[in-house]
């Protein structure tokens, strides 16, 4: 009995609870919101929202100040090897916090226009964010799976949050079935790896093959073991579902179309980023010895993903589906960075930089859509954006800059993101992949630029004066709250500043 | 504490930038010439309810300051400096780990083009300010952005910023064609956007290949040049990278058969945009080949010469004939600008100081003359309401000054002695005479073609009888001669054309000085059509080139 206690106390010494204070505070905040909703009188419910936003801002600021960004960056594990603390992990935690703040803001706007309950929405977003933040530091398959499931289960609810909308319900069902399927695949892969790694007859086996470091040394000793290869492929399939890579991209257009706009944004940015950070952790950690297999496999996936996303988006008129399909293409470009990271280690940081530029641009675009969207937003097409520039010049400018950044046009942030990934790919000698990426970018100019054309150039400015005086009508005219304008302005400014001056994220580069 | 330190460093950096600390006056002027138009654009963007007058004053500052600085720096440039670049400065922007920083400076090749950007930008700016357009503020904002980009392209020593400024200028071009353009503007803008993005990305890949191939961790052109002088790329790599640059830049410069976007886009573009794009921005690609491509990859250049000659002849002869067939004045000028790019490509193909020097002079002169012609075609449209040449006639009776300008523009375009174009063409002809003598025949035929369509257009529009269609459509008595807002830009352009036409030394001395350190004085004899020579002798020709280069640079030290 005492032996066991001794082991436990030894293990407990590694539990540095302080290091996961942001995740804990998010959880506490989420629970507090529910309690407050029950106890506070109706007329003071507005306080809850303010508390939620304020709390997140405090956590975010504290995270920036106390993070390892400005201190001495050392990688170390805690919780007996469950978590790995690194600069990249800290950056990604801030990334997810930023996402959560933006999603709460959009969600508040979305839900209040449609009379949906708001506190539960924020509660779920906070829990999902805490899960994502743990995911970014995971160093063990158990923790990885639990964190990933926390995220996924939260998303099941969020996707079908708009209960009155058939699109949303359909999307929720699709996401549930396919998500459960992919989780099963992931779990199956983990079990295979566990089984192989725990086999004492194989060289390098250990008592804890869930741990990435131990698993890594086992895989290095047995790179050709069929179980290892099968397990690796299955795990990567599960991750490919999250990032929307071919052939696990089928769910994206439907789910993006049906989910409420803030959730679509959350899925597009945070869930994808979660997938990528897991992928980075895996390919730089336990799967690094499998470079021989993974480079061609991931390379082929990247090519198919870029082509599928861009070709699918070419003729797409529904804007939410368009964002989904173009998001697939962006996942392809980032996969290019991942493939390069086998040869060029800083390529992984370039992917993180790309994620930041993607966050800024995507949230700006979804923010505009959220602001102008009709109540049933699943049907929003490019036609709804006709002449937005005259109806709402501010939103139009934000949208154009966001789209330009996604298309990778200098001097916007998206260009720098693409440039860094291209440089990395060059250094790694991936010329064929680069060629495909260039084709993809050229294709993407067509639909992004087409969208901007809809916003700005309809009908002709050259035509008669009388047309100028027509009362504008239709969507796009909801008066935006100042807070919304400020948020959009900050995102756009971020896109511009990162395009001109990358020093702000220099610790990544 | 670390956070404070970080903030303090950032503040320090911004202060350095704002106060131009640690820069010589002329070097900081170079930066000012780029920032002023951008700043003017931001001021117009940020402040809403400006009066017509103050909008004009602000944008005037944004166009005049770079033009004055470009003339001053041309004056201050002294020939023969050892470092190769004058007025250099270096500003950090946060990508130092990749060897990217805002390095500015001018050498003999970039000086004429920098001057061109200042002059044409001024002319286009003045013309735009005094023309009647809707949403003039937004229009001027975009033009100022283009102007900032143009000044930056030719002032950058850093490859990254060279590309970056090009895109800053290119994007507003698409937008202004799509918004303020004429017939078919949407599809023309879309075609141009897709085509030019492809070209830009191919050339970006080429530039990145140079960067990663050097292993220098630097995008600095000068240090790359030193590095590749010592350790050139392998032959295969040179071959492939030069192909990327040639076709990437070729698309941007409308090399035949990648030219189809150009006449359509120029046909639809508003005049100042066409002036800036055809006049200056398009020279980006040629400048890239001359300054970067050929000197860094001499073997690659020699391998692709054979094909390049035929493509350039396609520009000269095929597009030349297409130009003759045009009925629409603006389309005709668009085709003519595509055609003259063929000469510049021929000059590059010579790979000799005289041929390339001719190409640079021609780029300078063509920029001025094509800008003049685009502007005058818009003036004609303002008066006649059509671009169809056969519907106009006898305009000279009411507009003698306009007619005079137009004839001068056409003659300059055809390379009449006395205009700057002549020196560019003569340089190229001497270059190809020593390189491949038979090429003279199609090249001279091209000159005849351009005289033919130019003079025919002048005759149709300005002389002869009034056409019936024209007489019925507009009130001939109401037509007035050029306004001051049209006269001054034209005068600026014509004066520049004539000045260099009569005194080419103004540009050629510095140009010659720089080119002789990069190119052999004459084309090497072994440099026949590349496909005919076996590999070994091609290698010999390269080593021959580099040894020649060394002997040429010796006298300077």
Image: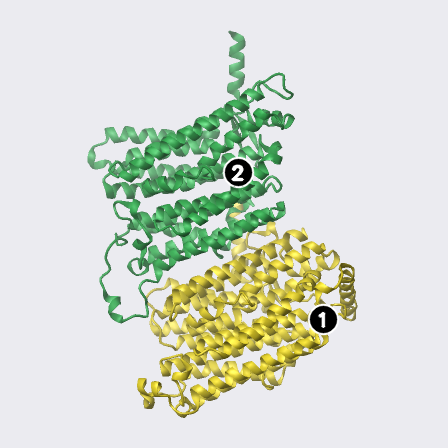
The residue at 66%/72% (across/down) is B356
Q: Which chain is green?
A: A
Q: Is residue A124 something one can see in this rendering?
A: no
Colour of chain B in the rendered structure image: yellow
Task: Determine whether, in the image, residue A217 is placed left or right of residue A100.
Answer: right
Point out residue A104 in the picture as x, y percentages from the top left corner: 34, 40
Q: Residues within 10 Å of mark 2 (few under 14, many from 20)?
A: many
Secondary structure under tag 1 reads: helix
Q: Name the image quarter holding residue B485.
A: bottom left
- Above-or-below relation of B150 to A321: below
- Above-or-below relation of A55 to B438: above
Toward the viewer: B20 or B36? B36
The mark closer to the camera, 2 or 1, is 1
Point out residue B47 in the picture as x, y percentages from the top left corner: 36, 64
Same-subunit check for callouts 2 and 1: no
Point out residue B163 in the picture as x, y percentages from the top left corner: 55, 60
| Chain letter belonging to callout 1 | B
Secondary structure under tag 2 reads: helix
Toward the viewer: A411 or B106? A411
Q: Residues within 10 Å of mark 1 (few under 14, many from 20)?
A: some
Give the residue at mark 2.
Answer: A88
Q: Is residue A364 something one can see in this rendering?
A: yes
- Above-or-below relation of A79 to A392: above
Point out residue A97 in the picture as x, y percentages from the top left corner: 42, 38
Callout 2 touching callout 1 (CB < 8 Å): no
The residue at 51%/33% (across/down) is A236
Q: Report the coloring of the rendering.
A: by chain
Give the residue at mark 1.
Answer: B516
Residue found at the far top of this picture: A1
State the separation of the CA atoms marked 2 and 1: 50 Å
Task: Determine whether, in the image, residue B371 is placed left or right of residue A364.
Answer: right
Q: Name the image quarter holding residue A287.
A: top right
């Amino acid at each position: 009995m005492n032996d066991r206690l001794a082991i436990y106390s030894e293990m407990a010494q590694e539990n540095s609870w302080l290091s996961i204070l942001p995740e804990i505070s998010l959880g506490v905040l989420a629970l507090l919101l529910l309690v407050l909703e029950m106890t506070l009188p109706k007329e003071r419910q507005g306080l809850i929202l303010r508390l939620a936003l304020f709390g997140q801002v405090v956590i975010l600021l504290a995270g920036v100040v106390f993070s390892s960004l400005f201190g001495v960056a050392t990688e170390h594990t805690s919780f007996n090897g469950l978590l790995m603390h690194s600069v990249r992990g800290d950056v990604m935690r801030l990334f997810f916090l930023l996402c959560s703040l933006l999603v709460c803001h959009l969600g508040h706007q979305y839900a209040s226009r449609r009379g949906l309950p708001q506190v539960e929405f924020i509660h779920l977003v906070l829990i999902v964010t805490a899960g994502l933040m743990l995911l970014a530091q995971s160093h063990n398959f158990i923790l990885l799976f639990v964190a990933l499931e926390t995220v996924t289960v939260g998303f099941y609810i969020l996707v079908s949050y708009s209960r009155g909308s058939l699109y949303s319900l359909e999307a929720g069902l699709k996401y549930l079935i396919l998500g459960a399927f992919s989780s099963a695949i992931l779990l199956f892969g983990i079990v295979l790896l566990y089984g192989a790694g725990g086999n004492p007859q194989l060289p390098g086996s250990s008592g804890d093959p869930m741990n990435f470091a131990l698993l890594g040394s086992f895989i290095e000793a047995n790179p050709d073991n069929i179980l290892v290869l099968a397990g690796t492929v299955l795990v990567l399939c599960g991750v490919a579902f999250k990032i929307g890579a071919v052939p696990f991209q089928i769910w994206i257009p439907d789910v993006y179309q049906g989910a409420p706009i803030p959730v679509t944004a959350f899925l597009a940015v945070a869930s994808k980023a979660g997938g990528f950070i897991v992928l980075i952790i895996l390919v730089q950690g336990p799967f690094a010895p499998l470079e021989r297999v993974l480079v061609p496999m991931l390379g082929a996936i990247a090519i198919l993903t870029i082509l599928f996303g861009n070709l699918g988006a070419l003729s797409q008129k529904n804007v939410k589906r368009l964002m989904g399909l173009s998001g697939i293409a962006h996942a392809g470009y980032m996969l290019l960075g991942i493939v390069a990271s086998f040869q060029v280690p800083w390529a992984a940081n370039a992917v993180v930089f790309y994620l930041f530029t993607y966050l800024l641009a995507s949230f700006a675009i979804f923010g505009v859509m959220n602001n102008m969207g009709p109540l049933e937003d699943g049907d929003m097409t490019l036609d709804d954006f006709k002449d937005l520039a005259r109806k709402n010049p501010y939103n139009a400018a934000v949208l154009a800059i966001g789209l330009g950044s996604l298309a990778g046009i200098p001097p916007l942030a998206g260009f720098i993101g693409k440039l860094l990934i291209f440089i990395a790919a060059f250094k790694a000698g991936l010329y064929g992949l680069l060629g495909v990426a260039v084709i993809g970018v050229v294709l993407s100019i067509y639909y992004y630029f087409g969208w901007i054309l809809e916003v700005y150039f309809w009908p002709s400015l050259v035509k008669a004066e009388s047309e100028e005086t027509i009362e504008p009508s239709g969507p796009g005219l909801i008066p935006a709250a100042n807070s919304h304008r400020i948020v959009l302005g900050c995102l756009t400014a971020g896109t511009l500043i990162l395009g001109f001056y990358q020093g702000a994220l220099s610790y990544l580069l | 504490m670390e956070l404070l330190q970080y903030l303090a460093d950032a503040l320090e950096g911004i202060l350095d930038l704002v106060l131009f600390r640690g820069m010589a006056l002329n070097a900081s002027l170079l930066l000012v010439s780029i920032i002023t138009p951008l700043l003017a654009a931001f001021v117009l963007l940020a402040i809403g309810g400006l009066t017509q007058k103050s909008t004009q004053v602000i944008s005037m500052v944004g166009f005049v300051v770079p033009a004055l600085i470009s003339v001053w720096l041309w004056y201050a440039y002294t020939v023969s400096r050892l470092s190769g670049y004058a007025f250099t400065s270096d500003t950090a922007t946060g990508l130092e780990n990749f060897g990217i920083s805002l390095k500015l400076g001018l050498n003999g090749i970039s000086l004429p083009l920098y001057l061109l950007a200042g002059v044409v930008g001024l002319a286009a700016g003045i013309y735009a300010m005094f023309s009647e357009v809707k949403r003039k503020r937004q229009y001027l904002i975009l033009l100022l952005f283009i102007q900032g980009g143009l000044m930056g392209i030719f002032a950058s020593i850093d490859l990254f910023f060279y590309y970056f400024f090009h895109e800053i200028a290119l994007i507003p071009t698409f937008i202004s064609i799509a918004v303020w353009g004429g017939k078919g503007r949407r599809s023309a803008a879309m075609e141009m956007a897709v085509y030019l993005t492809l070209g830009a990305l191919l050339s970006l890949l080429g530039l990145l290949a140079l960067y990663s191939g050097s292993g220098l961790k630097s995008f600095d052109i000068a240090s790359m040049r030193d590095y590749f002088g010592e350790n050139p790329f392998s032959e295969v790599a040179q071959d492939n990278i030069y192909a990327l640059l040639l076709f990437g830049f070729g698309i941007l410069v409308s090399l035949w058969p990648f030219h189809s976007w150009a006449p359509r886009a120029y046909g639809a573009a508003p005049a100042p945009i066409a002036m800036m794009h055809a006049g200056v921005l398009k020279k980006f690609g040629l400048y890239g080949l001359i300054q970067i491509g050929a000197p860094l990859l001499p073997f690659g250049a020699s391998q692709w010469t054979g094909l390049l000659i035929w493509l350039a002849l396609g520009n000269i002869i095929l597009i030349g004939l297409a130009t003759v067939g045009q009925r629409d004045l603006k389309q005709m000028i668009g085709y003519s600008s595509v055609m003259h790019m063929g000469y510049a490509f021929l000059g590059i193909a010579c790979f000799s100081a005289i041929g390339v020097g001719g190409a640079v002079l021609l780029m300078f002169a063509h920029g001025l003359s094509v800008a003049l012609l685009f502007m005058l075609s818009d003036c004609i449209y303002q008066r006649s309401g059509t671009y169809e040449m056969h519907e106009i006639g006898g305009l000279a009776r009411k507009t003698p000054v306009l007619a005079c300008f137009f004839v001068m523009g056409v003659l300059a375009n055809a390379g009449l002695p006395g205009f700057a174009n002549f020196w560019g063409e003569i340089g190229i002809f001497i270059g190809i005479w020593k390189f491949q003598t038979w090429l003279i025949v199609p090249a001279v035929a091209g000159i005849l073609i351009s005289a033919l369509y130019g003079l025919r257009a002048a005759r149709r529009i300005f002389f002869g009888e009034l056409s019936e269609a024209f007489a019925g459509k507009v009130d001939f008595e109401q037509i007035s001669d050029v306004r001051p807002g049209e006269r001054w830009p034209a005068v600026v352009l014509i004066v520049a054309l004539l000045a260099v036409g009569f005194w080419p030394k103004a540009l050629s001395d510095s140009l010659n000085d720089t080119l002789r350190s990069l190119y052999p004085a004459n084309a090497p004899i072994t440099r026949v059509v590349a496909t005919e020579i076996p590999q070994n002798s091609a290698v010999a020709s390269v080593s021959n080139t580099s040894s020649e280069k060394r002997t040429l640079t010796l006298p300077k030290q």
